Image (tube, helix red, strand yellow):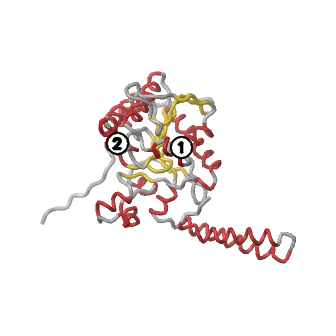
Amino acid sequence: MDPLPHEKQIEEYVKTIEHLKKQNKDNPLFKKEIIKLEEKLEKLKENTYGELTPWQRVQISRHPARPHTIDYIQNLCDHFVELFGDRFYGDDHAIIGGFATLNGIKCVVIGQEKGHDTESRMYRSFGMPNPEGYRKALRLMKLAEKFQLPIVNFLDTPGANPILEAEERGQAWAIANNLREMALLKTPILVLITGEGCSGGALGMGIGDVIAMLEHAYYSVISPEGAASILWKDSKKNIEAAAALKLTSEDLLQNGIIDAIINEPLGGAHHDPAKMFTHVKKFILEQIEILRHIPIPVLLEQRYAKFRAMGRFQETPVS
């Protein structure tokens, strides 16, 4: 696993400890030294991961070994039947979805999938959905409504596909239509931002009754690089942009954009995927149990009020 820039010192400690253990496994004189180094390593990890900057959090959210939608489906669902196509144009591999059961609870699971290697990333369009992907997602959500099944949406995208062909096929309309239709769906919707939640590409599947983020995911109207290019005409100002965008889970919880933060293993989900799957599954089951007992008219009114209340502004008198 390749270390991120802020993890280089940690990686050096790990390599030193492994080397000492390998070279001196039968020498008791080195045991105390190894124990001391391991204690220093734990303190270093706590300090490093306890003081992460917004940009470092973005880097964690993009780590290639971070669990993706397909990993959550495989590790959370007892059964999963994938469905394909939007019934208008074709199938978009950047979005995966279908009927699933979690601990015996039937639901519809949909998510944005980036892929793990070069071949799968190309196949999944790097997690950037096309209009047919948003239409497929909406088709599956309509099926969930028809059969009164809760919906679980996983968001992890750098944005909707910006290519000309996607625009020609109605990218903006597909996203806007999803926003309207999801606001009116008569079934519980749970949204989880597991990695990148960028721009309208994420929001096109992001209307829900409960919105949760993994601790080191990010959710923003634009990527830090994109914001830096617009505001400073310099994409290298990404560190400043990440701080200004208030895109971390703590910022978004404080501003009422999300409802909950799901804690990650120390350093990020990619350090202990099994633990991350356990946390996410527990959260999903708890929320479904709460949402399924809320009457639909109340659920819709709460969903409407939730999004109407988002946003903050301050009026300054003109002198």
Determine the image quadrant of residue 235: bottom left
In what quadrant of the picture does the N terminus appear?
bottom right
Determine the image quadrant of residue 138: top left
Asked if labels 2 and 1 touch by Cβ distance under 8 angstroms, the answer is: no
Helix, strand or loop at mark 2: helix
Q: Which of 201 and 144 is in front in this view?
A: 201
Q: Name the residue under label 2.
A: 307
Q: Nearer the viewer, residue 296 or 154?
A: 154
The reply, left or right, for residue 51 in relation to residue 255 is right
Q: Is residue 266 above or below residue 38?
A: above
- Residue 30 at x, y percent in the picture: 81, 76
Count the numbered circles shown. 2
- Residue 214 at x, y percent in the picture: 51, 50
Q: Mark 1 points at which residue?
A: 120
| Residue 295 shows in this picture | no
Q: Which of 105 and 134 is in front in this view?
A: 134
Precedes in sequence: disc 1 or disc 2: 1
Q: Which of 208 and 225 is in front in this view?
A: 225
Classify 10 Å Cα crowding around label 1: few (below 14), some (14-19), many (20 and above): some
